Image (cartoon, rainbow, N blue to C red):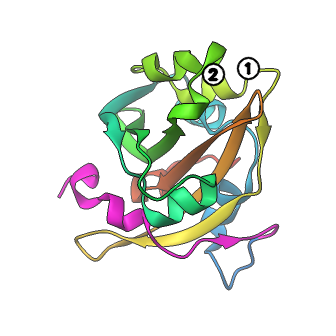
Amino acid sequence: MPIPSALTSMNFDVRWTGLRRVTRLHAPQCWQRWLTDRASLTQHLLTASQGHFRVEVVRQGWARPTRSEALELGIPMRQLALIREVQLLGNDQVWVFARSIIPASTMTGRERQLSHVGNRSLGTILFTDATMRRGPLQISRLKLSNQQKVWARRSTFFLSGKPLLVCEVFLPALEQVNYRP
């Protein structure tokens, strides 16, 4: 089963744990640095793939965030947000599935560009914006519809003080890569 079809919005409505340091009890050694690194994931994937990196949009549109996502963003449960789901591929393998929740109130002024990212990495916009501030990392173990479990992290970013939530799901193919952040 392809990863995007194994992930639905319900996979993201789980308990997230805020951790400053991931211990072996929480995640296998091979995932700990990926889960806790605060630098640009895009840059790490570019390096790991020796430049053979691309982004594919799976879905993008206006929808209701999950309860957990709305709470994290501090928006009403029924408020629509732009939800962007992408695959991050290195060497033609899907290494990461990313889900971004961008409230309408965030997409004003310069941040209007967030609705036109297309097949570019959102990270290239976030990590080059001088106003960007990143909130604490949270981790969780998501269960796919095929019962496989994968590690994920999320954090709220602020551009010009306006929030957006980015969740990154680390897929099994990334474990085979000879690179660690």
Q: How far from the left and from the top, in percent, is residue 58?
A: 29, 37
Question: 24 or 48: which is nearer to us?
Answer: 24
Whether residue 154 is visible here, answered yes or no, is: no
Q: Is residue 167 above or below residue 120?
A: below
Identify the residue position indicated by label 1 in the image: 128
Q: Which residues are magenta?
A: 1-21
Callout 2 crowding tier (Cα within 10 Å): few <14, some 14–19, many ≥20: some
Q: Quadrant of residue 154?
A: bottom right
Identify the residue position indicated by label 2 in the image: 125
Question: 125 or 102: which is nearer to us?
Answer: 102
Callout 1 crowding tier (Cα within 10 Å): few <14, some 14–19, many ≥20: few
Q: Is residue 150 above or below residue 81?
A: below
Disc 2 residue type (three-letter): Ile
Q: Is residue 30 above or below residue 160?
A: below
Q: How far from the left and from the top, in percent, is residue 11?
A: 37, 66
Q: Are marks 1 and 2 in contact (CB under 8 Å)?
A: yes
Residue 6 lies left or right of residue 89; in this view the side is: left
Residue 58 lies left or right of residue 64; in this view the side is: left
Q: How far from the left and from the top, in percent, is residue 160?
A: 76, 27
Disc 2 secondary structure class: helix
Whether residue 86 is visible here, answered yes or no, is: yes
Q: Is residue 26 above or below residue 10?
A: below
Q: Is residue 4 located in the magenta-colored stretch of the structure?
A: yes
Q: Quadrant of the N terminus?
A: bottom left
Disc 1 residue type (three-letter): Thr
Q: Quadrant of residue 172?
A: bottom left
Question: 29 or 164: which is nearer to us?
Answer: 164
